[in-house]
Image (spheres, rainbow, N blue to C red):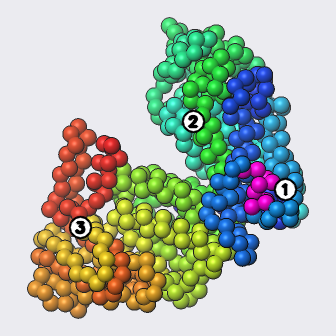
Amino acid sequence: MMSHCFSGLAIFVFLTSLFVDTEAFFPLLSKASSPGNDFTHKIMSHRALLKEVAKYLEDSPRPGSKIQPGELVNLRPLTSSSLYTAYHGAGKISAVPLEDAINEIIEGNMNIDSFHASSPEMHFNAEKFRKANARLRGTRRTIIKQLKKPETDFKTVRTLIGEYLHIVQDFYSNTNWVEMKGAVAYEDLGLPGVDILPYAKRRVYTCKNCDDSVPGDCENNLIIGNETLTSGYRSHQRITKPKGTNGQGKCSHGGRYDQTKNTIATGGINKESRDPHLSPHNALHQEAAMSAMIATENFFLAADYGPVYITTDPEEFKAAIGNLAVDGGGDCPELSMAGTILAIQNSLPGSDLYVFTDASAKDNEKAFEVIKLGLNRRIKITYFITGHCGGLRRSIDGQSAANTIPKPLEHSRWKRSLNAYKDIAEETGGVVVEVSKEELTKATEIINLSFEGAEVSIFIVDVVGRSTVKFPLDSTISKIEIAVSTTDESLSMISYDVAGPDGIVRNDTKELINTGRELVLIINSVDVGDWTLTLYDDSEWHIVVNATSSVDFCILSTAKVILERCCHCTAHRQWIKILQYHFP
């Protein structure tokens, strides 16, 4: 994937360096938004901004501090004052500058309703998806340009960020995204080089008549498919709602103040409030708000990722890799999980996915989503890790990665990321290989296995202590890869033997990696029968045996819960996981 990187550090430098008639969600609680528990633009922005500052401070603890992961993020109440008190100590540094900076972003957010109420593209109204997405991209480019200036006007940047967040937040209250996907963020929204999802064309009817004065009557008024976006038209904007017929037509925004709700299709779909007289889809207000807050937080994770580069030409692929450039440096951790999700979504089912990184992940919380998506699409994910980084810099040298231990301030995040990478690899049938950059070429011989025939996982097991494990090979298998990993950091090398069906230790085993925590072996010529792997060190082991096979046969039937497998797929846990996800 190509990277259009936008440094999260730059956002937080100006956010935290100070110590160091509405169109969608209501801007503020008022008589117009009667339920006092509505999520407004101000509430969502304020919560998300404080949460992201808290994450940043957790990842950049003060020397000698004992702040634990989640300690600041989960403060109750989470305010600028409580956050600074927990981080710096009571009364040591004023939180007023931080609160002022957050308020400048919120003021920019409010500006959209104040100065752009009649522009549907500023609110994702009237199916102006392409224009709204282009506006987001343009605002993002302007923010980046401002941040790169020698003397950045941070007040202007904060205002622009507020405007950007308003448009993003409106996407979730004004469109049918939540009805289609639930309380999740649209990861690609506003990113350069990524097209908006398909949306309804002008002549396509999207709603049927309902009466939004009757609570609940409009809950099922959408008639558009679950893979096509739509949004409501509303009065007082620079576009007229197309005419409908026979009780069907374009959706309205709806609610007490929208006159288009009286034209076919009557009613509306907005989720800006819990009040049914203001929001026909009020039952989904919380889901829309949760999605909007996740999207707001994602902006302050702040790296761009993507777009995906797809080619079947090896030379084109090498040229694309050669053209990659590092941008936005300083803030080492990246949106590794989000990038992996994007890669999975653009890969053919049954593919092998290889992730090369020397960075920890900012978005470890998405690891389960990576696992679930990888299992559903039968994607095996293998990580090649050539170093580590934590808060603000990379750490890598010429020695083996197994001997490169993160400094204390970097250790927590790196440990969480490494564990997430290992969980993903283990669940999808891949491995995690930690090597220095000098060892990488040798390690990537693992990839060759997937080009030499159908690659199947024939054996996956966890064992404890000095162990001998047995795995069968049949006549369809021509080559095997054995990957062993442990969390034990005291070993400098893993001691082992591999024996064939005759019980004789093989001397033709090709050792690609042996770092003490990772062992990867290739055996190019194998015999039919039961093989054994003996591990002589006292540790906890995760063992994966992959093979090049002339057969790749695994069928999942959704009509009946049937699992048919070839004889050497019995230990392939991916399929059991798929059944768990599809048939809870």
- Report the residue marked by disc 1: 95
The stretch in magenta equals 78-86
Quarter holding the N terminus is bottom right
Whether 12 is drawn above or below 44: the answer is below
Quarter holding the C terminus is top left
Of the pair 508 and 267, the residue shown nearer to us: 267
Please provide percent x and percent y for residue 387: 55, 78
- Report the residue marked by disc 2: 287
Of the pair 23 and 93, the residue shown nearer to us: 93
Q: Residue at x 60, y 75 (%)?
A: 411
Q: Which of marks 2 and 1 precedes in the sequence?
A: 1
Q: Residue at x 54, y 12 (%)?
A: 209
Label 1 Cα neighbours within 10 Å, binned few <14 / some 14-19 / many ≥20: some
Whether residue 11 sits left or right of residue 260 in the image: it is: right
Tell me the number on the disc at residue 458.
3
Q: CB atoms at circles 1 and 2 under 8 Å apart?
A: no
